[in-house]
Amino acid sequence: MKIGLIGLEKSGKTTIFNALTGSEEAVNTYTSQKVEPHLAVVEVMDPRVTRLKEMYKPKKTIYATIEFFDFAGLTSGSSMGLVKTSDALALVIRNFSNDILDETLGKPDPRADLDNVRSELILSDLIITENRLERIEADCKRGKKTPELQKEEKVLRKAANKLNEDKLLRELDLTDDELKTISGFQFLSLKPLLVILNSDETCYGNNQGLLDELSGEYDLIEFAGGFEMELSRLEPEEAEFFMQDMGIETSAKERLTRFAYDMLGYISFFTVGEDEVRAWTLHKGETAVDAAGTIHSDLARGFIRAECFSYDDLIEAGSEKGVKDNVHFRLEGKNYTLRDGDIINVRFSI
């Protein structure tokens, strides 16, 4: 899972990046020349994996991971090519005061900043759409009109109409087939979008009116970015003390991880054994053969059956033998829809 942090310059993206990843990238009030994104891979500390590790005592334990990218601040007309590699976008909006920033950029205005970035996303997609439609029209005039080209043109015109209405493409009702047709363009406004309201300690938790206003349009979460960056550098016991004082129940990383899984529609399944306990990520609604392919393409190609039981049943029974004794051990076919917390072992033959 790849999440790209975007936002206007000085919105606090790198502060949020550090809070999420425990990194110590430089945070500067003044203009930065950073072009290349910061990257960090963060383990999803699922307590179920930890419990499975205790039960199986494997040689290796592998948690699921999230890749966070901290991109350079967006400016009018800026290139967004690198951002397209992300599975989802986390838009950081400035909601903190700073004497220097207030003087140069003005007082924090989250609504205006959000509208500004929204316009940048729409403009980026509209340029791509119109350029492609021009090429399709030229091809058709040269006699290269094919059913595939007509199909693509129809979807792109639908997209262009929505963008010209100043709407995000994710607000457009597209079929799975239409989405597949335009998937190669990696449209930014089609990606899942999470808005992070980056507040300072003095106003964190006192923005309910703004949160209510924006939550009707966007998936939204509030962080006290600077505070949580400092928390990420403390020992867990010390960090918990300060979190309680601020009314923060869990770390920024835990909250964003949970939010990302829900927003992107992901579940976790597990493989277990003496050699390895591992968490895998799958989209809700995907099947046993999809899970097999996530582990290795050969398992999907030669799929026969999946031995399957749930994490909850294992914990209740205390062992795999107990699961079998309680008749909770199942053999599932390739069309079985995996559930969050399923533990599987794939039978296959090539």
Image: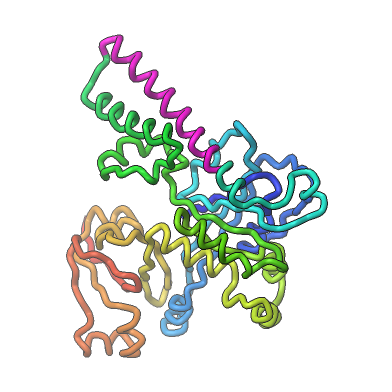
Residue 63 in picture, x, y percent from top left: 48, 68
Q: What residue range appears in magenta?
A: 117-143
Q: Nearer the viewer, residue 114 or 279?
A: 114
Whether residue 121 is in magenta: the answer is yes
Measured as percent of width and height from the top left, residue 317 is found at 31, 90
Q: Is residue 195 above or below residue 234?
A: above
Percent x, y of residue 64: 47, 65
Task: Report whether 334 appears left or right of 139.
Answer: left
Q: Is residue 102 above or below residue 177?
A: below
**What sort of colour scheme is used for the picture?**
rainbow
**Count of numbered badges drawn on the protein:** 0
User: Magenta segment, principal secondary structure?
Assistant: helix
Q: Is residue 51 magenta?
A: no
Near-viewer residue (128 or 339): 128
Residue 121: x and y in percent read 51, 39
Residue at left offset 28%, top offset 39%: 178
Answer with the quarter of the image where residue 292 lies. bottom left
Please tell me which residue is depicted at 24% across the width and 53% down the height of the picture.
301
Which residue extends farthest top? Answer: 142
**Quick one: 164 or 187, which is closer to the camera?**
164
Direction from residue 304 to residue 58 in the image, left or right: right
Q: Is residue 195 left or right of residue 142?
A: right
Q: Specify the quadrant that holds the C terminus.
A: bottom left
Quarter residue 126 falls in: top left
Q: Residue at x 25, y 73 (%)?
A: 308
Instruction: From the viewer's perspective, tell me whether residue 344 is left or right of residue 192.
Output: left
